[in-house]
Image (cartoon, helix red, strand yellow):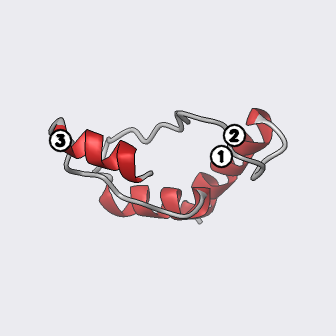
Amino acid sequence: GDLIEDTARKHGFTDLYRVNDLKEAVEKSAQIAKEKDIVLLSPACASWGMYNNYEERGREFKNLVADLEK
């Protein structure tokens, strides 16, 4: 976490946000996204036991996004 964030900032990436889970990530994305923006689930690593597989993680992402629309 810290090393990745520090390296990204050194290379000019300043809009970085830390969250604890996918739900927080979706909520934060909804807060900062502007109209017609695309929010893409593109994990850079494994879920470290949070999900059984990538399909479960993808379903959770879709469900969280759908919940925003309610």
Query: Distance of mark 3 from mark 2, alpha carbons?
Result: 31 Å
Query: Does residue 57 appear left or right of residue 68 in this picture?
Result: right
Residue 58 - label: 2
Q: Residue 43: x and y, percent?
A: 55, 36
Considering the numbered disc 3 on the image, is that residue within a helix, a strand or a loop?
Answer: helix
Considering the numbered disc 2 on the image, is that residue within a helix, a strand or a loop?
Answer: helix
Name above or below for residue 15 compared with residue 21.
Answer: above
Residue 62 - label: 1
Q: Residue 68: x and y, percent?
A: 55, 62
For residue 67, what is the image quadrant? bottom right
- Mark 2 vs mark 1: give the one in front: 2
Label 1 amino acid?
Lys
Q: Residue 16: x and y, percent?
A: 30, 52
Foreground residue among 52 and 8:
8
Residue drawn at x 63%, y 57% as measured from the top left: 64
Label 2 amino acid?
Gly
Residue with the mark numbered 3: 10
Residue 44 - label: none
